[in-house]
Image: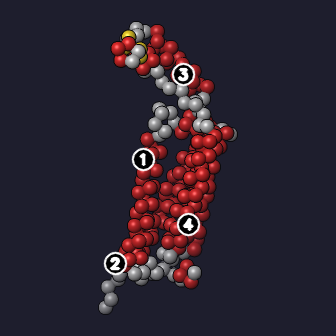
């Protein structure tokens, strides 16, 4: 524990094998952050946004979808009986996104509750070894901690309280990404930065 009370320079002094282990872990977390960002950017994959994914489609979205389907049905239909009996209208119909069921969201939350705090704990502890000023360390770790909690709670709020909580989901994801990335970059730099030339 004394390592966390001293000023910086401790990471660079670690044995090579320890620095390689920590670097491997931090790079794996970086890869997870990149994949998470790509996953969020791709959306749920059902043609709907995150609010629709958790809370189901809103009534205005459903009405628009039904009107679009009715419009497509009013034109000529292509009979594709030889290809499984699908008509042009049914093949192009936009699926309606139902509300995410409770069990599925519980399973997702269960995994996140085990993993996200553990990753934060390890990354934050390694970052504390950098020896940045206490206010900066406190700020980064506080943002990452609050963002972790908010990001775990936000899907439930979107699903059960209001679709407007999707902004909390997005903001907490961005805050978590930025704060974790800052801690990782600072830790890697402190671990591998060149030693100053001695005269």
Instruction: Give the mark nearer the N terminus: 4 vs 3.
Output: 3
In the picture shown, does residue 191 fall above or below 107? below
Local secondary structure at mark 2:
loop
Instruction: Give the mark nearer the N terminus: 2 vs 4.
Output: 4
Of the pair 158 and 168, the residue shown nearer to us:
158
Residue at x-position 50% and y-position 26%: 95
Gap between marks 3 and 1, in whole Å? 28 Å
Indicate the colouring scheme. Answer: secondary structure
Please provide percent x and percent y for residue 131: 51, 77
- Reading the image, the residue beneath label 2 is 194
Local secondary structure at mark 4:
helix
Instruction: Give the mark nearer the N terminus: 2 vs 3.
Output: 3
| Quarter of the picture holding the N terminus | bottom right
Counting every numbered tag in the picture gives 4
Instruction: Give the mark nearer the N terminus: 3 vs 1.
Output: 1
- Reading the image, the residue beneath label 1 is 38
Q: Quick check: 153 left or right of 191?
A: right
Residue at x-position 42% and y-position 20%: 91
Gap between marks 4 and 1, in whole Å? 24 Å
Local secondary structure at mark 3:
helix
Instruction: Give the mark nearer the N terminus: 4 vs 1.
Output: 1
Gap between marks 2 and 3, in whole Å? 60 Å
Q: Return the mark for residue 184.
A: none
- Reading the image, the residue beneath label 3 is 64
- Reading the image, the residue beneath label 4 is 121
Please provide percent x and percent y for residue 136: 55, 69
């Amino acid at each position: 524990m004394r390592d966390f009370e001293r000023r910086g320079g401790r990471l660079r002094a670690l044995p090579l094998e320890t620095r390689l282990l920590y670097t491997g872990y931090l790079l794996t977390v970086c890869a997870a952050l990149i994949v998470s960002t790509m996953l969020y950017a791709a959306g749920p994959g059902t043609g709907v946004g995150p609010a629709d994914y958790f809370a189901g489609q809103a009534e205005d979205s459903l009405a628009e979808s039904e009107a679009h389907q009715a419009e497509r049905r009013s034109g000529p239909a292509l009979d594709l009986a030889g290809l499984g009996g699908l008509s042009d209208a049914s093949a192009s119909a936009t699926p309606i996104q139902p509300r995410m069921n409770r069990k599925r969201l519980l399973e997702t939350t269960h995994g996140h509750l085990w993993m996200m705090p553990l990753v934060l704990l390890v990354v934050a502890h390694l970052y504390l070894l950098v020896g940045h000023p206490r206010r900066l360390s406190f700020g980064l770790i506080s943002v990452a901690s609050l963002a972790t909690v908010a990001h775990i709670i936000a899907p439930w709020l979107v699903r059960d309280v209001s679709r407007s909580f999707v902004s909390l989901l997005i903001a907490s994801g961005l805050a978590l990404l930025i704060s974790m990335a800052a801690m990782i970059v600072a830790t890697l730099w402190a671990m591998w930065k060149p030693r100053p030339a001695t005269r």
